[in-house]
Image (spheres, rainbow, N blue to C red):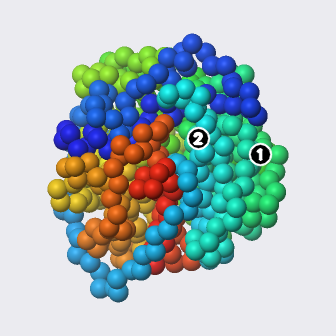
Amino acid sequence: MKLRRKSVLAATASLVAAAAFVGSVLLAMTSATAAIAAPSPSRYATTTPSAVRATPTATLDPIHSPGQSPSPTAASPSVSPTARPAPTVRESLVAQGTEPSIAADPFHPGVVAIVSENLVMTAERSGCSRPAVRISKDGGVTWGAAVYPWRAQCQDVHSVLAWGPDSRLWVGDAVGATDGVVVSVTHSDDLGKTWSVPWVQHFTNGWSGCFPAITADDWPDSPNFGTVYVAYNWLPDNFGPAVAVIASRDGDNWVHTEVTLDSLPDYPYSWRIGYRIQAAPDGTALVSFYESNLRLWNPANMLDEGPATNIGRMGFEVARVHFEGKSLSVDKPYWAANVDHTEAQWQSALAIDDSGQAWLVVETNDHIALGRLDGRWREFSVSGQSSFKPSLAISGRTIFVGWHASDDDGMVRTYYTLSYDGGQTFSPPALISAVAWNPRSADVMNGVGLRENADFGGGVVYYAYGDARSGLAIYMAAIKP
């Protein structure tokens, strides 16, 4: 693994183990959690002991063939640009903060929301945050004042958001409980002026994990139009985290299910994180997650996957979720992609196109790998640089992929590519801006961005990411294809 690749891996050590506050009271964590919160591999560290590599390429399986194992059917990358005018790109500083998540209102062009973390460090490598939501009504030219769905209480550091119909803005995060942290969801129907009483899940035990993902069904012809889905991790036993999914139509009445998990012979332990969830136009939803199958695993040191000899496979699984109003079920997951290093777990993206086809983007082999889950995939990279942390957004036949790359000096830049023909061809990788930044200036828990993503709204791509060119800050690029 190239040294430059290790130097730009985002800090992840205490992201799941961060202690949570309720109000101003620090939640007392267990001794196991305390062990987890100790310093460990950082995405911007110079050494990453657990960043082992195994399978060298990403391979994707058909979505309708969950029983198949990955087969190397890689297509040669196409960078032939579709004959279109050059897109317009407007990059702007949103606010100081870290770990942004963005969503565009699909029914009101120009209405965009970003939730970010405002870290409160309680120790050198642990802390909590006051999640803040900012809303723009003009496509990010200006932003409203920060609002705090949990009234500025100090909570977990992984808040996420999604727009539903009628401009209902859903926000999820983990909040403190007696046995760790658990998922909480709230919503606003008036652009953040007021928020519903936060609902706190009661289906599964608390843990030092959680790391939620959220989506709303915005497909007008879907039988579950308006439904909100949340996926999160928790620890049912010492064999590894589970994948929990909950859903609701009103934010008050929720149902729950668990993704059936599998393991390999002689690898009874599984580490899972990095969940993503997206609603599909047929009324189902898809959930994806990183998984590594391990010979040994210690929940008191949960981020340590061990050396390559301890890992049977590592990559991503995908499962389809079915919501019937009063019940929730999920199909058996299928193995979707192999990756070649453990830190690919922290950033991936899942998207559904208008035909209901699922797309997954991951990082592997210093490249960005994009796959449609019918076996076709391609890779993107920047010559002489190491590519990482991909984001994905799809609208019609237009596909956006954004990512970061670092050069031999460790300087980080942000790139993107576009397809206008449903993934047949892509434009050459292009810079968002010419500005580069040094990851040494982002020495903070979780780095500057861990859940960054992109979303389409009104024909514009809104891409949010952490950037340390001017301190710990959130930037957004508005890209008009």
Dot 1, how many residues are within 10 Å of its Cα: few (below 14), some (14-19), or many (20+)?
few
Coordinates of residue 388 in the picture (x, y in percent) = 32, 50
Q: Quadrant of residue 143?
A: bottom right
Identify which residue is drawn at 50% across, 54% down. 473
SS under mark 1: loop
The amino acid type found where label 2 is placed reads Leu
Q: Is residue 397 left or right of residue 133?
A: left
Q: Is residue 363 left or right of residue 29?
A: left
Horizontal side, residue 380 vs residue 401: left or right? left
Q: Nearer the viewer, residue 315 or 4?
A: 4
Q: Indicate the amino acid at tag 1.
A: Arg
Res 54 seen here? yes
Query: Where in the figure is residue 50, as x and y percent of width and height?
Result: 32, 28
> Which image quadrant for residue 6?
top left
* Residue 371 visible somewhere in the drawing: no
Residue drawn at (19%, 41%) of the image: 2
Q: Which residue is mark 1?
A: 151
Which is nearer the N-term, disc 1 or disc 2? 2
Q: Nearer the viewer, residue 143 or 247?
A: 143
Between marks 1 and 2 in the image, the one whose residue lies nearer the viewer: 2
Local secondary structure at mark 2: strand
Q: CA distance from mark 1 to mark 2?
A: 15 Å
- Residue at (69% x, 37% y) in the render: 154
Return the x and y of residue 438 as percentages of the image width and height. 33, 50
Residue 119, numbered label: 2
In the image, 70 versus 426, the foreground residue is 426
